[in-house]
Image (cartoon, rainbow, N blue to C red):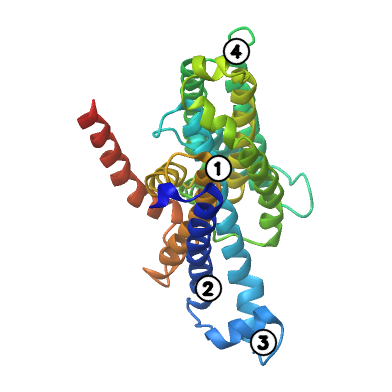
Amino acid sequence: MMRKLSIGQRLIIFGTLALIALIVSSSLGLMIGSVEVPLAELWNLIQGSGPVSDTTRTIVMGLRGPRVLLGMLVGASLSLAGCGFQGIMRNPLADPYIVGTSAGASLGATLAIVLRLPSPAEWISPVPAFAFLGALGAMLIVYQLSKVGSSVPMETFLLAGVVVGSFAGAMVSFLMTLAERDLHSVVTWLMGSLSQADIHMVYLVLPYMAIGGIAMIILAPALNIISMGEESASSLGLNVERLKISVIAIASLITAAAVAASGLIGFLGLFIPHIVRMIVGPDHRLLLPISALGGAAFLVLADLLARTMFAPRELPVGVLTALIGAPFFFWLLHGRRKLS
């Protein structure tokens, strides 16, 4: 029956369901914690009328609000990037960290922590700033290494990502041996967490996610065409190399911003787009926006579980997503092996 509906009708149906899931997960993220926030007070605060205690206002506006917003943005960014890489490579096993952005961000963040580098701006700490710069640097190196003339073969691109990622990972390991008292900070960042979320982090990710998300959705028809193969897409008049460069640049930028703000949160950009694809189908006009909403809802809920499962201790959300994503990855590999 869903196949008989128009793309607009399907977008409304699935978009509404995904939006409801995001609203529910965000509400739970704002309400649940060491101090419970009543739903009535939360609603009064959102609509700007009715009684709201100072405690509720401080918790929601100063602590949980920025954390939930950052979780939404990071989850949406990684899911969009995952969709883009899977579409351009025609491979459901591709994920946002495939271009070495994660390794570059790790190296930048580790340098900032171990060498105690100064902040490039008063409104942002040095760790996310240098993580972002490291991610961009890794992306540019991978791109330059993978170019063959004026084209970017995907096989070479993947290989360059592995090489750069391995080198950056080795440098991180070397710096960790020198870290001594800063080792805990390095390890915590590498495991991925939203515990340091504030409104400045939200401002860091928001423009990249918004502009990159809009640009990626604009490219959705082209991603649908290239899914038929590069030769078929070229015969239909699509500039394949320009599309590759555009998707790689957009996905890498939004990944860099997300990783800079939250550390390494793995597997989310792999399994969220794949699950959404199984539900809504391969049409990127549906897949991209629904994956963004689904990724946002999932990460907010995962962060809620990470900070409440072992309260008062907090589990890094990157560890939780890996515990969920790794079995899914093995299941996906097993399914592909059975089909081959």
SS for dot 2: helix
Given the image, on which type of amino acid does mark 3 rest?
Answer: Asp
Q: Quadrant of residue 64?
A: bottom right
Q: Is residue 164 above or below residue 309?
A: above
Pointer 1 residue: 285
Residue at the location (54% across, 73% down)?
Answer: 30
117 or 206: nearer the viewer: 206
Pointer 3 residue: 54
Q: Mark 3 or 4 closer to N-term?
A: 3
- Would you say 118 lies left or right of 188 here? right
Mark 4, Cα crowd under 10 Å, few <14 / some 14-19 / many 20+, is few
Closer to the camera: disc 1 or disc 2? 1
Farthest residue in the left direction? Answer: 338
Per the model, the C-alpha gap separating discs 1 and 2 is 28 Å
41 or 201: nearer the viewer: 41
Q: Are marks 3 and 4 in contact (CB under 8 Å)?
A: no
Given the image, on which type of amino acid does mark 1 rest?
Answer: Arg
Given the image, on which type of amino acid does mark 4 rest?
Answer: Ser
Q: Quadrant of residue 311?
A: bottom left
Q: Which mark is residue 122?
A: none
Residue at the location (63% across, 65% down)?
Answer: 66
- Would you say 270 lies left or right of 259 here? left
